[in-house]
Image: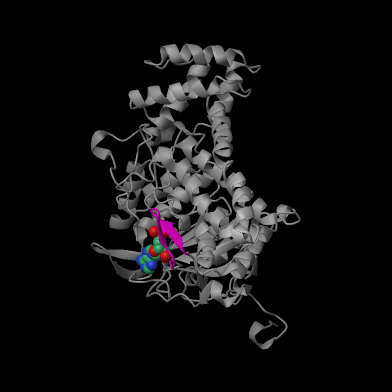
């Protein structure tokens, strides 16, 4: 005998098995979002599913990767736990304030509670028009969604906080851009989608009550340890400054250029979000820009710490009324917190760069040593990733780096002051200097094969290689090669 769930009112099965779910954001006041479901798509086809991530989230991979799962991940069917909505947010884009952005092509289904109790948003990007779409079509295309999948998963493997990609679903619908392209969605998993721009949205309206509700929600969700502090909103600002200082320092250590560090693309959680025109630098130059829309170099590689600081000042402004109703009092208090950002960043950056050079102890002259190396690398147009990886072998005396002899002698002297052996230094360096990063030309080649020829083999191999960036197997050695002149990718695009 079998029980049919439909006739048994005591059994409520989720549409897809596994996982615990909640919708805490949907319990916030109505003015925080617009409730609406994704717009269905013609013929959803799962082109990439992240079984490892599904496992971490406590989702049954087999079920979620089934036709039923693809229906949910494309927005064609809603699991019963979902409370779909588009979030409100504002943002400073290239320095100019837009009071109304919001999820114009993304829908938050709700939250997954992983086995360890951690809460994650499940968000469908490319899910159709919303009240915030303005002139956009609400859709996304296959190439950029697969690109987000590749780069966000590579960032995760590099140990850098990031939103992740659970799946990419092709919609079977054409999407008009400069040409007609295949449509797709990415199912994005994030610690949350709270942005600096979410705070700016309510602050710009003078809705102090909403800013307070949002701040309390952010504290509960990301920084519960500061809840009992005497000045929790200053502590929130300090916590976000610390998280972003750490994050941007991590970017700088692997040569990552975000490309659109608008305040709506900066999270409160400290995760990297919004993989649009982002790219990894090949040859070292702090002025490197890839984004086709960044004409002034505002978001150039070397400018990222300054922009993070600038964005955090925007966050600080939104929190002023919560700190004290009297601006004369709140401004100096917030300034004191925000002024610490450069110091926090420098501390994280120095610590990370020391590890890249195999140094554990701290010496005042280390900063000069690091900066002199970077200057030399710029003069030599050296590959950022490979130069550091070569230094691992140099530390052990297994290689030399032509052109760096004088600097190398200083570094060897400095290494000699450490208590660990050269091979221990090299081992440390090999866990902080990736052998492989998602190089633009390789990402482009894998995407072209997938999108133009429906050949997913190069993409699958690339994902395997990028999943262990500190440990490159000899048979994949070509993935560490910088682009040949004709392979060089000059520009990246938002993919909107
Ligand atoms: P982004 O540059 O991706 O951070 O997006 C900036 C704003 O544009 C956000 O409000 C997005 O939701 C919106 N947007 C981007 N692409 C589209 C699209 N195809 N349709 C509607 N809104 C979009
Ligand atoms: Mg964005």
The C terminus sits in image quarter: bottom left
What residue is drawn where x is 60% and y is 75%?
Answer: 29
In the foreground, 127 or 102:
102
Which residues are the magenta region? Answer: 90-101
What residue is drawn where x is 49% and y is 77%?
Answer: 37
Q: Is residue 347 above or below residue 422?
A: below
What residue is drawn where x is 32% and y is 42%?
Answer: 441
Counting from the top left corner in percent of width and height, residue 197 is at 49, 60
Counting from the top left corner in percent of width and height, residue 415 is at 57, 16
Q: Is residue 430 above or below residue 107?
A: above
Q: Is residue 49 visible?
A: yes
Q: Is residue 377 above or below residue 346?
A: above
Total of numbered circles in the picture?
0
Colour setting: one colour
Counting from the top left corner in percent of width and height, residue 90 is at 46, 64
Q: Is residue 236 left or right of residue 402?
A: right
What residue is drawn where x is 55% and y is 64%?
Answer: 122
Q: Is residue 30 left or right of residue 474?
A: right
**Among all residues in the image, which is located at the extreme front?**
328
**Among all residues in the image, which is located at the extreme bottom?**
7
In the foreground, 231 or 430:
231
Say if the magenta span includes residue 98: yes
Quadrant of the image occupied by residue 159: top right
In the foreground, 486 or 462:
486
Say if the magenta span includes residue 37: no
């Amino acid at each position: 005998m079998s029980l049919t769930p439909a006739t048994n009112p005591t059994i409520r099965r989720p549409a897809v098995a596994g996982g615990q779910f909640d919708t805490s954001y949907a319990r916030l006041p109505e003015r925080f979002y617009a409730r609406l479901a994704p717009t269905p798509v013609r013929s959803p086809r799962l082109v990439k599913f992240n079984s490892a991530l599904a496992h971490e989230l406590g989702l049954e991979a087999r079920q979620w990767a089934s036709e039923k799962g693809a229906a949910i991940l494309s927005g064609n069917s809603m699991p019963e736990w979902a409370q779909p909505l588009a979030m409100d947010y504002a943002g400073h884009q290239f320095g100019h304030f837009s009071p109304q952005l919001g999820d114009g092509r993304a829908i938050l289904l709700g939250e997954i509670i992983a086995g360890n109790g951690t809460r994650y948003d499940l968000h469908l990007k490319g899910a159709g028009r919303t009240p915030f779409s303005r002139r956009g079509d609400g859709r996304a295309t296959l190439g950029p969604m697969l690109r987000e999948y590749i780069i966000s998963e590579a960032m995760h493997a590099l140990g850098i906080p990031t939103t992740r990609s659970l799946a990419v679903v092709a919609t079977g619908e054409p999407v008009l851009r400069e040409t007609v392209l295949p449509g797709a969605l990415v199912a994005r998993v994030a610690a949350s989608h709270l942005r600096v721009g979410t705070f700016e949205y309510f602050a710009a309206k003078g809705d102090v009550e909403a800013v307070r509700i949002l701040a309390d929600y952010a504290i509960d969700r990301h920084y519960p340890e500061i809840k009992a502090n005497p000045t929790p909103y200053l502590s929130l600002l300090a916590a976000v400054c610390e998280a972003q200082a750490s994050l941007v320092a991590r970017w700088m250590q692997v040569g990552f250029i975000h490309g659109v560090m608008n305040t709506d693309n900066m999270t409160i959680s400290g995760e990297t979000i919004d993989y649009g025109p982002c790219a990894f630098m090949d040859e070292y130059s702090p002025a490197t820009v890839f984004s086709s829309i960044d004409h002034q170099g505002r978001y150039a590689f070397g400018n990222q710490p300054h922009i993070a600081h600038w964005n955090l000042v925007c966050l600080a402004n939104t929190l002023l009324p919560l700190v004290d109703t009297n601006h004369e009092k709140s401004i100096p208090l917030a300034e004191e917190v925000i002024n610490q950002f450069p110091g926090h960043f420098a501390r994280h950056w120095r610590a990370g760069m020391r590890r890249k050079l195999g140094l554990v102890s701290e010496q005042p002259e280390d900063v000069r040593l690091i900066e002199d190396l970077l200057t030399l690398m710029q003069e030599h147009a050296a590959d950022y990733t490979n130069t550091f990886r070569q230094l691992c072998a140099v530390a052990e005396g297994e290689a030399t780096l032509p052109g760096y002899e004088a600097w190398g002698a200083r570094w060897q002297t400095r290494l000699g002051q450490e208590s660990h052996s050269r091979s221990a230094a090299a081992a440390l360096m090999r866990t902080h200097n990736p052998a492989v990063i998602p190089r633009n030309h390789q990402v482009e080649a894998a995407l072209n094969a997938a999108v133009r020829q429906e050949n997913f083999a190069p993409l699958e191999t690339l994902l395997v290689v990028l999943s262990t960036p500190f440990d490159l197997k000899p048979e994949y050695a070509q993935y560490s090669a910088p682009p040949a002149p004709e392979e060089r990718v000059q520009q990246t695009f938002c993919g909107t």
